[in-house]
Amino acid sequence: MMFDYILLFAVALSALMAIIQEDLYKSIIILTFESFSLAAIFHFLLATDVAAVQAILGAALLPGLFIVALYKTTKGRDE
Amino acid sequence: MLEKVYEIFHEKMKDKGQGMGIGSALTSEFLMLSFLLIGAILVLRTANSTILGFGALIILGGILFTVPTVFKVEKENTDSINLSSFYVALTLALLFVIFLGGI
Amino acid sequence: MEPFQVASFMTAGVLIVTGLWALLMMDNILKKIIGANLIGDGANLVLISIGYRPGGFIPEVMHHFHATATPSNYSHLLQFEEFASNASYSLPFALVLTNIVIGASTLSVMLALAVVLYKKYHTLSVQKMFEGDE
Amino acid sequence: MLNNSTLIPLMVVLPLIMAILVNFLHQKDKSVKFISIVSLIVFVFIPVVTLYGVHLFSGHLRTGSFPEISKLLIPDVYMGIVYSYGSVQKILMVVLTIITGFTVLTVLNKKMISGVYIAMIFISLASTSAIMLADDIFNFFVFTEILVVAQVALVIAVQDTKSFKAGFKYMIFGTISGASILLGIALLLGVYGLLNITDLSNAIKAGGQLNPIALSAVSLLTLGWLYESGLFPFHIIKCNMYENAKPEISALLQVQSKFVLVAMAIILFRVFSGFALLKSVMLGFAIFTVVLGSVMALQQVELRKLLSFVAVSQAGLVAVGFGIGTSFAIAAGIFHAINDVLSMAILFFIASFVYDKFKTTKLEELGDGLQVVPLVGFVMLLATLAISGVPPFNSYQSEWRLIQAAAQAGVPELGVLVILLSVATFVAIIKAFFMIFMKPGPKVEVNTEVRGTMFKAIIVILILTCLAIGLFPNIIYDPIYNFVVSLGV
């Protein structure tokens, strides 16, 4: 039954990592991991509907938006 | 006395407007000082704790040594995002200290 | 309070403090937006933890009730007191659903603004964007 | 009082529906114009005809709370979202809808007919009305967030780098304040288990002393209040928003932020009634805002920035009324919010006209305007007198009541502060008036195509309203005072 505590620790750690990380792509991937494990924690906290929404938003929409923004910003510098 | 003050302002505002600009700067300087005086009187009269009273006196003394204050106020109120962030963090901390600590 | 609840509150605290730090201190504009996202996650986690009840069941997934039940055959189903004392508190979940949607829309507006600002200044540094010459 | 009127939610729902409709009609100029004018007439009409009362969403009545199981402190609670509509809400709604109408008319008049733009104005109108009407603290939070996004959309529509920067800053700090309001609500929900403001107020009264968690909620909600109303640490951000928007939009933005200030301060006072420290803290931040806003306003050489700082410092003066905390002072503060909103709107509309006519708002380059547009100059002089509290106009009535309330509450120094602020405001705006309309030797050309009949009509109507309120203040002041007394804060 330690799995949920490990997930909590992972969320806190990955939040810190996402901020400290220099490479923005890596930082976004870590953020996706954070969102997804947050969805799992919501499931353990008996909120399944919220967990579903958070999983969809955190794992698909949010990194998608970030990747698009990053693509638009770093591509412009290279050209 | 007033000519001296005018000279100081003239010197400080060379790159900005002259004439009317100096007039409004002088007005705001006097306003600032009177606001400070009123604030100090208010705090000293109504504050129950000695810490607040001493704090008000120290701040008042410190500001009176930095006349003219207007330029410093203007420097602290620029559009800079870092300065705003600093003040927001300060305010958040101050609110917690006041409400939870209970001055 | 349950230990798991306390642990989630502490995690939420870490998320909020990290996000606030990123939002106020980081120079990179995308890092600021990531910080904003983290603050929202932390607030959501606080709300969800309030509704948690150890060993309870999920109010939306109640197997004892079914859609065609009429009041006459409620008697053999779960009693109201049993439901009230076992289900988790579902009001915060509804609040969090709203907040997730609001957070996503705010985030997309901020990212769009970041892209526009990048096109003007060709940098991601907030310092250079905001303190530079007009 | 329990009058389940369906007209009350229409004030929020109808602007939202119209916003969606106008948004879809993006390229069709004529239908956008027709729909927005018709819907504006309806928006002004609804608050006037609606009776006072409450609306219970989906008809959930006040029911028993089962204190043994739920451990709530009060015997019965509201089960759904509640909107309440009283006299103060009525007056604020009428003023808000009228100024929104004027803004939309100027936008349509400038041939800037864009469906999305008008949709954003309607959404901000809907969210401001919801903030004023909501008796539910989470509903309030949701609409503050929507208001932030709509206001940023209105500002960045200028397509200028400075406006993008202002919008981004506003959103960054909006995230902080939104999260802090949400956390405050979450902590209150955790302690008392309630979201309805009336119930929460009763529960906190029944619970006695506030515990540390509730005190953290107070400080977080206070930070949110400071942001929403543009007080001390956020005054620069708010001012940037005003100065970088189109001036007629700034006229709308300042109305919204002042009314949100009033609404949220009433909510805070109702929830934490009898918590005196909150009032002192509000007073402190309000005084800071007044001082910094007026001192900065005197330094400006650009009309829009000058007016923005004046608007911010006047918001501080409204908050001073709340900070003093007696019912007389709170009523005077609300009254001053209404008066100030009207005269600030005149000044912003004049700034908009000047920007159209002379293509700049830099005071250095302008001049000799009185020969070109004598009527506008005369109205600006009257508006300057109105905003700095000269007797026949409306701000005199509210500032006089504020000074009286300060003296009654035992802090006559604040009366001196109010007088100093009105002097500073007068000096700042009369300087702008001189430099635009009387200084010889303009450096800019006059755009003769702009006739501005609409602007002239609007500012004349507004200044006449100011004069009417100044001559008969009791029509507006008495309902406000009775409402504040009935709140019992």
Image (cartoon, coloured by chain):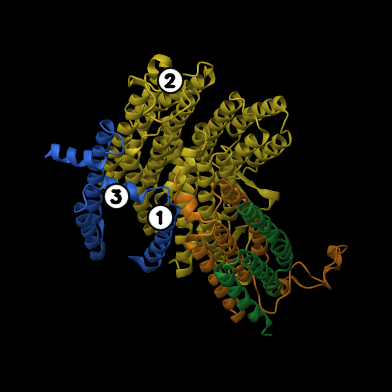
Which residue corresponds to the image point at 67% horizontal and 49% vertical from the top-left?
D57
Question: Can you tell which chain is drawn blue?
Answer: B
**Which amino acid, mark 3?**
Lys
Task: Let me know if marks 1 and 3 both belong to one chain.
Answer: yes
Give the secondary structure at mark 1.
helix
Task: Name the tint of chain A in the rendering.
Answer: green
Q: Is residue D327 above or below residue D199?
A: above
Q: Residue furthest top?
A: D371
Few, some or many residues within 10 Å of mark 3 (<14, 14–19, 20+): few
* Residue that numbered label 1 is attached to: B83
* Residue that numbered label 3 is attached to: B72
A2 left or right of D144 in image? right
Disc number at residue D376? 2
Task: Name the tint of chain D in the rendering.
Answer: yellow
Task: Let me know if marks 2 and 1 both belong to one chain.
Answer: no
Question: Can you tell which chain is drawn orange?
Answer: C
Q: Residue furthest front?
A: A79
